[in-house]
Image: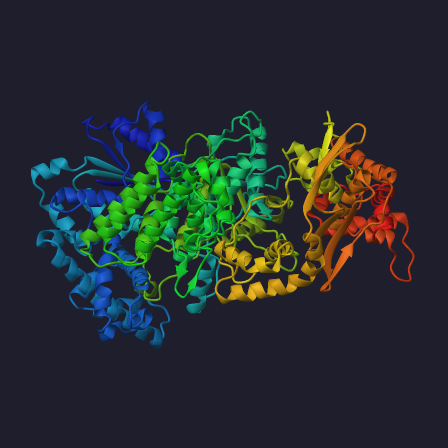
């Protein structure tokens, strides 16, 4: 017997199921109860509910309908394999064999034009996947087409398309005929191929187009033993739709066992004839009838097509029926909307009025996905405070794309410690494995490896994975050393030094040879067989270099192998070897490695079942393994007693007190589905056909109905960069339809449920009247007048140094704000990561040119050739002829500077050690590049403020040591070499000036004191024909310049709107007045 139970609430259906299990317990306690479900989440929820209702929920099976029917079919036909020969994944490989063979036939001219004369295997594979998916849909929704095609009869199919097709033009009809011709021929070839590669018995019983016919015949001719083996009863729970093929099979099965189908019907009345208002008006217009308003609920009409079609099918079958429906009687807006759907009414009850305190339906317009999650977290805290009975497990948060929101969810919900009252426990489900499992992500990256992708950064990134580091004996601390070595050894990209017609000295081969040679030689020993040793890998560091070479060697072997197509057996062996050689097996990696092995074995079984033995490219293997691994998305955390974050999927609409939907953007939901132009079903749609947009509309309806207290929605509805008046961002059309529905009842509701959120979590708008924020750490910031803020407050227990390095003092005076951020606060606003370029050198960057200039200035003419040869072996010069051009340009540009400095370099170089007693502290340092009494420094570039400051301080230090010392700084300006020399200064003045810097430096350990340290000339040198501006104006000009040109000062300025300009002006005079007086 087949019985249908109609209800508008899943909780009521759960109670009906519990009642049946209690009143009619299974006569055999060892026989499992079978409950067909549509999602794993539904199975988990139902099992928990059954356990609570029965005390224990053991011996329950929760298969999906397709898997259950195939398992039952195999039970009746034991000779059938585990995998159906007409399975989609197997069909793909069969089509890979057939498609190239058929391209010579006239019917396949269109496919041949698409694939080209020389069939691209990857392109063919993508086409085979689309065709296999289409045939799979035909097997479920149009099996009679396939049966006709096998009989070489297309007339009935054509007639059906003509009858159901709407306003079809002749050109479109001809296009359909051409597509049908090659599809029918390809299907016949596919069936023939399956018949040739399977036994007749397996073929005749596994043919899915004849499933219904053979299944019915078997059920009519069961032996007593076979009848006994059938399940005694079957429950179908939480399924919103079934294809006719599956429903027919279950109906036939109900002749031998009881089948109970629980169907969620949002209304207590029959609504199978309810259609959208716009469709209703089109029908009236077509029939020349007045467009009368249809009775019923417009939301159900717009969103309920999928459930409406299945409801119609169930009612037409005239099954045994039981109805248990109850209207939601809660006195809030959400309940009123659900009541209207339940009663098939459009207008709210006359006694239901607008209530400003009602927040049962919420819509939040935010500036970004991050703000969506931040606002959600704040709103959940608000709900917890308002309802003490609300628990995290009562909340579900869904999104059309959970992968997009996962990083923001973790960032926001993991922001608080578990002992913080704002901490909300949560779980994330349905993420792609490649995004959650670093090992799987690294494996998929290796499958897509190309020679040009073998960059230094990509290889070092792989070593971030613990399983790879452990395999090669690397510690976490070794990564910094390896990164430094790789950069200094000139490694950028590429495997081999000899690449075609040129030598790539930025390749791994050259760099590794340098590292390995460095184990026994020093760079000073000169080249050995065109390899220059790397000094830093000498001695005990050789083991680290050897492990790196072994790691790159494995990647190189893999790269060589995957550059050619191979049969699957070879791919399987090579991939297994790669896993064994690259990853260490431990408790953390074992599960991931097992998943890869299982996906590999499954792919091998599919190809073997399809008798596919051709050599294939890595792109095909990669695509199949990536899909298989990502299908193993983690849903183990679903319903784990926390706030559940998951993807918006069918029948995830389990009853929750609070249902939240993120990412309800116009372009993202309903999700777009691009149909293949050769999908014939689209030209002859039938009741029960699946369409992703219709599915999503029903998902939205289910989500609304499953919310008991709060239905929460958010979307990116505000732009970070554009004025909303000129570039408005709209929510999903479904959200807009809900808003319009509320507006038609009462415009106040539409305005009330929409909340336009502030751009940042620390915006003062979050703390205004009518808003509640639980981010109390930002409250003081928003309430304190900005002009009175002291961003850098005095530090408690300041450190008082007894000795100051000369380099530190210079760095402080050059940029006191940056020094304070770096040394005192430990804050680095620029990236400290020593990134490595990913392409071999073809031209020198400005920094590279400067490094060469700095080296070349101090070299003699006869040493240049040797220097450039070593630079080439180090991978520092461009490739091939570009190297000679670069050498010539460098030598030419440096010649004037060398001419100025060469007379000094002929003398012996000495250095001066400084230990200057300045009272409470000692200034210590070492001044190199002393030739006689001249300290010679240079920069092959223009004079910068930081150069001026550095050499001014050096000049002061030298003045404290001896009057005989002279400092000269050479630089280039407009192609001309110039020199900076300061006038002599007395020892007393020098000590006094150094004292000013020392006092500011020591004081910075408690509170920052600073002067304008860039564009200082504006303080001391007026523009031609103009007087110097007033002090406040000068200070403001300095502030403006630093704000625009210094990242650290800009950060300081953002938090401090008002500076003491008089103090800044005076500090600048004190710090740099004498510098301009004595030298510039």
Residue at 41% of width from left, 38% of height from top? 543
Foreground of the two, 317 or 678: 678
Residue 119 position in % (x across, y down): 29, 68
Quadrant location of the N terminus in the rendered image: top left
**Residue lying furthest top in this view?**
55
* 217 up-or-down from 592: above or below: below
> In the figure, is residue 805 to the left or right of 507?
right
Foreground of the two, 929 or 783: 929
Is residue 269 visible in the rendered image? The answer is no
* 674 up-or-down from 713: above or below: below
Is residue 84 visible in the rendered image? The answer is yes
Residue 962 position in % (x across, y down): 81, 40
* 50 up-or-down from 197: above or below: above
Foreground of the two, 1058 or 25: 1058
Which colour assignment does the render follow? rainbow
**Residue lying furthest left in this view?**
223
* 789 up-or-down from 1078: above or below: above
| Number of numbered labels in the structure image | 0
> In the figure, is residue 132 to the left or right of 152?
right
Residue 674 position in % (x across, y down): 40, 61
Residue 264 position in % (x across, y down): 37, 42
Quadrant assignment, res 451: bottom left
């Amino acid at each position: 017997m087949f019985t249908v139970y109609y209800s508008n609430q899943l909780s009521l259906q759960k109670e009906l199921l519990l009642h049946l299990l209690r009143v009619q317990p299974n006569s055999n306690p060892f026989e499992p109860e079978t409950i067909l479900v549509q999602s794993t989440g539904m199975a988990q929820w139902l099992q928990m509910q059954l356990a609570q209702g029965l005390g224990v929920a053991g011996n329950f099976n929760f298969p999906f309908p397709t898997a259950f029917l195939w398992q039952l079919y195999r039970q009746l036909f034991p000779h059938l394999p585990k995998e159906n020969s007409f399975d989609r994944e197997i069909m793909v490989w069969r089509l890979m064999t057939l498609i190239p063979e058929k391209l010579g036939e006239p019917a396949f001219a269109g496919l041949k034009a698409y694939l080209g004369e020389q069939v691209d295997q990857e392109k063919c594979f993508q086409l085979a996947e689309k065709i296999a998916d289409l045939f799979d849909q035909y097997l479920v929704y149009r099996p009679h087409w396939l049966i006709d095609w096998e009989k070489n009869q297309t007339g009935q199919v054509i007639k059906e398309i003509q009858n159901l097709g709407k306003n079809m033009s002749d050109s479109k009809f001809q296009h359909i005929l051409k597509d049908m011709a090659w599809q029918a021929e390809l299907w016949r070839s596919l069936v023939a191929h399956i018949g040739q590669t399977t036994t007749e018995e397996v073929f005749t019983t596994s043919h899915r187009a004849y499933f219904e016919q053979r299944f019915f015949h078997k059920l009519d001719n069961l032996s007593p033993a076979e009848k006994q083996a059938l399940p005694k009863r079957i429950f179908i729970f939480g399924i919103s739709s079934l294809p006719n093929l599956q429903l027919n099979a279950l109906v036939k099965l109900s002749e031998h066992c009881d089948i109970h189908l629980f169907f969620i019907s949002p209304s207590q009345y029959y609504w199978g004839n309810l259609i959208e208002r716009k469709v209703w008006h089109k029908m009236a217009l077509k029939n020349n009838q007045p467009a009368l308003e249809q009775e019923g609920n417009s939301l159900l009409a717009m969103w309920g097509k999928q459930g409406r079609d299945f409801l119609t099918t169930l009612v037409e079958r005239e099954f045994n029926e039981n109805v248990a429906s109850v209207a939601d009687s809660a006195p809030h807006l959400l309940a009123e909307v659900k009541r209207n759907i339940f009663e098939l009414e459009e207008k709210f009850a006359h006694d239901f009025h607008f209530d400003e305190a009602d927040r049962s339906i919420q819509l939040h317009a935010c500036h970004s996905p991050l703000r969506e999650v931040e606002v959600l977290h704040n709103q959940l805290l608000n709900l917890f405070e308002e309802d003490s009975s609300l628990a995290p497990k009562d909340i579900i948060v869904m999104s059309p794309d959970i992968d997009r929101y996962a990083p923001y969810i973790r960032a926001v919900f993991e922001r608080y410690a578990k002992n913080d009252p704002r901490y909300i426990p949560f779980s994330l489900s349905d993420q792609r494995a490649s995004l959650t499992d670093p090992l799987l992500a690294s494996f998929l990256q290796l499958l897509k490896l190309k020679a040009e992708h073998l960059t230094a950064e990509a290889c070092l990134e792989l070593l971030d994975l613990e399983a790879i580091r452990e395999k090669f004996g690397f510690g976490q601390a070794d990564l910094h050393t390896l990164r430094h070595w790789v950069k200094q050894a000139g490694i950028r990209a590429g495997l081999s030094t000899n690449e075609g017609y040129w030598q790539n000295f930025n390749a791994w081969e050259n760099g590794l040879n340098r590292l390995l040679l460095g184990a026994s030689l020093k760079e000073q020993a000169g080249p050995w067989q065109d390899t220059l040793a790397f000094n830093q890998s000498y001695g005990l560091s050789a083991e680290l270099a050897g492990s790196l070479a072994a790691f790159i060697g494995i990647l190189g072997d893999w790269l060589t192998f995957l550059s050619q197509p191979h049969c699957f057996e070879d791919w399987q062996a090579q991939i297994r070897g790669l896993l064994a050689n690259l990853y260490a097996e431990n408790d953390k990696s074992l599960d991931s490695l097992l998943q890869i092995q299982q996906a590999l074995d499954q792919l091998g079984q599919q190809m073997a079942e399809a008798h596919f033995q051709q050599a294939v490219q890595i792109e095909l293997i990669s695509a199949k393994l990536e899909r298989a691994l990502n299908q193993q998305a983690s849903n183990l955390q679903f319903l784990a007693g926390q706030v559940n974050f998951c993807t918006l999927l069918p029948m995830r609409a389990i009853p929750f007190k609070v249902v939240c939907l993120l990412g309800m953007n116009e372009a993202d939901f309903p999700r777009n589905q691009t149909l293949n132009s050769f999908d014939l079903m689209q030209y002859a749609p039938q009741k029960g056909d699946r369409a992703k947009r219709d599915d999503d509309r029903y998902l939205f309806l289910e989500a609304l109905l499953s919310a008991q207290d709060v239905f929460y929605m958010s979307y990116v509805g505000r732009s970070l960069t554009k004025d909303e008046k000129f570039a408005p961002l709209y929510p999903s059309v479904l959200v807009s339809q809900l808003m319009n529905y509320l507006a038609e009842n009462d415009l106040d509701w539409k305005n009330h449920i929409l909340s336009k959120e502030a751009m940042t979590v620390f915006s003062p708008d979050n703390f205004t009247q009518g808003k509640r924020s639980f981010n109390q750490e930002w409250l003081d910031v928003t309430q304190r007048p900005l002009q009175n803020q002291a961003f850098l407050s005095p530090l408690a227990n300041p450190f008082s140094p007894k000795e100051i390095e000369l380099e530190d003092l210079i760095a402080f005076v050059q940029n006191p704000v940056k020094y304070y951020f770096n040394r005192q606060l430990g804050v680095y606003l620029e990236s400290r990561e020593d990134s490595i370029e990913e392409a071999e050198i073809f031209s020198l960057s400005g920094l590279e040119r400067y490094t060469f200039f700095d080296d070349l200035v101090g070299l003699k003419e006869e040493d240049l050739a040797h220097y450039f040869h070593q630079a080439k072996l180090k991978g520092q010069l461009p490739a091939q002829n570009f190297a000679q051009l670069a050498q010539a340009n460098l030598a030419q540009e440096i010649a004037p500077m060398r001419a100025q400095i060469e007379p000094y370099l002929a003398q012996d170089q000495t250095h001066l050690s400084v230990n200057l007693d300045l009272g409470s502290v000692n200034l210590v340092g070492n001044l190199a590049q002393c030739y006689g009494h001249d300290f010679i420094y240079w920069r092959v570039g223009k004079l910068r403020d930081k150069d001026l400051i550095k050499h001014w301080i050096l000049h002061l230090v030298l003045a404290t040591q001896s009057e005989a010392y002279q400092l000269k700084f050479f630089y280039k300006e407009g192609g001309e070499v110039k020199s900076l020399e300061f006038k002599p200064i007395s020892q007393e003045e020098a000590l006094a000036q150094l004292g000013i810097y020392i006092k500011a430096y020591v004081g910075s350990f408690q509170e920052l004191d600073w002067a304008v340290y860039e564009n200082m000339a504006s303080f001391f040198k007026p523009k031609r024909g103009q007087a110097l501006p007033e002090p406040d104006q000068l200070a403001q000009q300095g502030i403006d310049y630093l704000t625009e040109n210094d990242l650290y000062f800009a950060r300081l300025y953002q938090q401090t709107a008002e500076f003491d300009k008089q103090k800044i002006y005076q500090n600048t005079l004190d710090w740099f007045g004498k510098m301009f007086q004595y030298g510039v």
